[in-house]
Image (cartoon, rainbow, N blue to C red):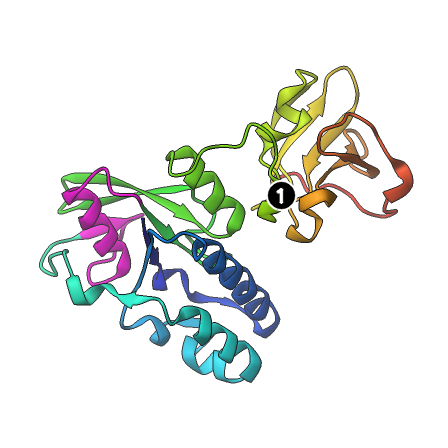
């Protein structure tokens, strides 16, 4: 398994507050990968020169928070530079969404997938970038070869990629010890036959929204890792007013209004 950290997903999208939260998500994702022995994390030698905050190199932004910088470098030390075994041709073109990415990680992962289409490789993107709402991107080499690249941006998207590509087996039942929110198919949303999938998500990067058949209620998995394990549950909203109604345990159809949050609404995107 090869994990390519996409420096191009650092495109000055953060302020100092969202930067810290994005780094925390990134570190949790790297830690999730670290539980697998057969993995290689690769980065560009120019990674720290890209900009997460406006007009500021990533390395400089990290150094303004000593604790965050220390934790990041500790978790990042296993990443190696793909330039040491570079496959892509710097005289070729690698285009995604009409932008050229030769000499970047995107070009490198693309070339490796061209050489070995069966390679288990994923492009790890930072939050809120122009890549982070894609589960895959299509990169065109030399205006002739289109290659699909799998993408991830947090633990849940990595987990889904691992299952979809059969790198790990999907649990028949939710594995609480994994420390991640359940997949939809591990909950009553898919196992009970009582729900229909809507076209919505709960926020841009949120989970899919389901409607309880015959009832004006939207049900969506709470995607917070703080509410995973034995705390895993589904949030329930009124389908007309969008107001919060309460929660249900992930494996039950049982509205519990004890945890109703007044003023909270679902963000349908």
Q: Position of residue 232 (x, y in %)?
A: 70, 41
- Residue found at x 88% / y 47%: 262
Q: Position of residue 148 (x, y in %)?
A: 28, 39
Task: Determine which residue is flagged by label 1.
Answer: 181
In the image, is residue 260 above or below residue 17?
A: above
- Residue found at x 35% / y 51%: 123
- Whether residue 117 is in magenta: the answer is yes
Q: Quadrant of residue 136?
A: top left
Q: Is residue 267 left or right of residue 115?
A: right
Q: Quadrant of residue 247?
A: top right
In the image, is residue 83 above or below residue 97?
A: below
Q: Is residue 219 left or right of residue 71?
A: right
User: In the rendered image, which quarter contains the C terminus?
Assistant: top right
Q: Position of residue 237 (x, y in %)?
A: 78, 35
In the image, is residue 48 above or below residue 223?
A: below
Q: Which residues are magenta?
A: 94-120
Q: Position of residue 11 (x, y in %)?
A: 42, 65
- Residue found at x 37% / y 53%: 37
């Amino acid at each position: 398994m090869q994990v390519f950290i996409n420096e191009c997903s650092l495109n000055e999208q953060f302020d100092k507050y969202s930067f810290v939260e994005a780094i925390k998500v990134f570190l949790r994702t790297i830690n999730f990968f670290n539980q697998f022995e057969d993995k290689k994390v690769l980065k560009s030698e120019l990674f720290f020169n890209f900009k997460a905050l406006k007009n500021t190199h990533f390395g400089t932004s990290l150094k303004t928070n000593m604790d965050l910088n220390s934790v990041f470098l500790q978790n990042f030390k296993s990443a190696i530079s793909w330039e040491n075994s570079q496959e892509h041709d710097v005289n070729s073109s690698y285009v995604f969404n009409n932008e050229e990415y030769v000499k970047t990680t995107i070009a490198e992962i693309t070339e490796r997938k061209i050489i070995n289409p069966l390679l288990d490789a994923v492009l790890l993107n930072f939050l809120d970038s122009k890549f982070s709402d894609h589960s895959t991107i299509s990169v065109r080499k030399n205006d002739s070869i289109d290659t699909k690249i799998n993408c991830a941006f947090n633990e849940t998207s990595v987990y889904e990629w691992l299952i979809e590509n059969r790198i790990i087996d999907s649990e028949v039942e939710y594995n609480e010890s994994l420390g991640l929110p359940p997949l939809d198919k591990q909950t009553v949303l898919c196992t009970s036959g009582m729900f229909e999938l809507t076209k919505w998500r709960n926020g841009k990067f949120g989970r899919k929204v389901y409607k309880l058949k015959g009832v004006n209620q939207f049900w969506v998995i709470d995607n917070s890792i703080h509410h995973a394990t034995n705390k895993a549950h589904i949030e329930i909203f009124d389908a007309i007013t969008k107001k919060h109604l309460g929660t249900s345990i992930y494996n039950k159809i049982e509205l519990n209004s004890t945890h109703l949050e007044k003023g909270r609404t679902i963000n349908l995107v």
